[in-house]
């Protein structure tokens, strides 16, 4: 299945920025529940930051729009995308 997807569609894209590792985990769980694979990576710094410090959450390019919808980042009426810091809670 993955071999049928062009390489530019499997490249990783940032879908959200989390303020900490636990927040990134929640975002990743929401994506996983929708069948979207994701990975989180520290934005800067090293292991001395522990669970604190912001993280980028990446998804495959072909999953980006669906991931934004799952996270409530796309305003479907206007087609605009909100900043990832504006994640709606309890969705």
Image (spheres, grey):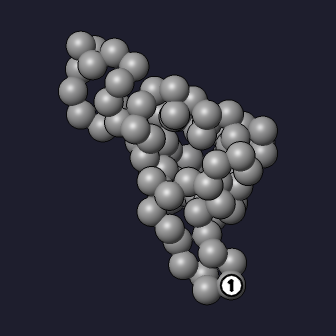
Place of residue 22 in the rendered image (x, y in percent of width and height, measured from the top left) = 51, 26
Which quadrant of the structure image shows residue 77? bottom right
How many marks on residues? Answer: 1
Place of residue 4 in the rendered image (x, y in percent of width and height, measured from the top left) = 70, 53
Place of residue 30 in the rendered image (x, y in percent of width and height, measured from the top left) = 70, 41
Q: Is residue 89 left or right of residue 35?
A: left
- Residue at 54% x, 78% y is 80
- Is the N terminus in the top left, top right, bottom left or bottom right quadrant? top right
Nearer to the camera, 37 or 3: 37
Place of residue 9 in the rendered image (x, y in percent of width and height, measured from the top left) = 57, 58
Q: Is residue 87 left or right of residue 13?
A: right
Q: Secondary structure at mark 1?
A: loop
Nearer to the camera, 63 or 30: 30
Nearer to the camera, 77 or 56: 77
Q: Looking at this view, name the residue that lies furthest to the front.
A: 89
- Residue at 50% x, 58% y is 86
Q: Is residue 8 left or right of residue 52?
A: right
Which quadrant of the structure image shows residue 34? top right
Can residue 63 be seen here? The reply is no
- Residue at 56% x, 54% y is 87
- Residue at 43% x, 46% y is 17
Categorize mark 1 by other alpha carbons within 10 Å: few (<14), some (14-19), many (20+): few
Residue 22, relative to residue 69: is it above or below? above
Which quadrant of the structure image shows residue 63? bottom right
Q: Which residue is mark 1?
A: 77
Residue 32, relative to residue 66: is it above or below? above
Residue 7, relative to residue 50: is it above or below? below
Can residue 46 be seen here? The reply is yes
Q: Is residue 39 left or right of residue 50?
A: right
């Amino acid at each position: 299945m993955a071999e049928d997807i062009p390489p530019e569609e499997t490249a990783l894209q940032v879908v959200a920025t989390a303020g900490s590792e636990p927040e990134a985990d929640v975002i990743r769980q929401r994506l996983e529940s929708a069948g979207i694979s994701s990975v989180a990576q520290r934005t800067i710094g090293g292991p001395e930051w522990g669970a604190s410090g912001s993280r980028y959450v990446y998804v495959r390019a072909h999953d980006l729009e669906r991931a934004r919808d799952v996270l409530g980042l796309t305003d479907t009426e206007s087609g605009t995308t909100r900043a990832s810091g504006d994640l709606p809670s309890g969705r």
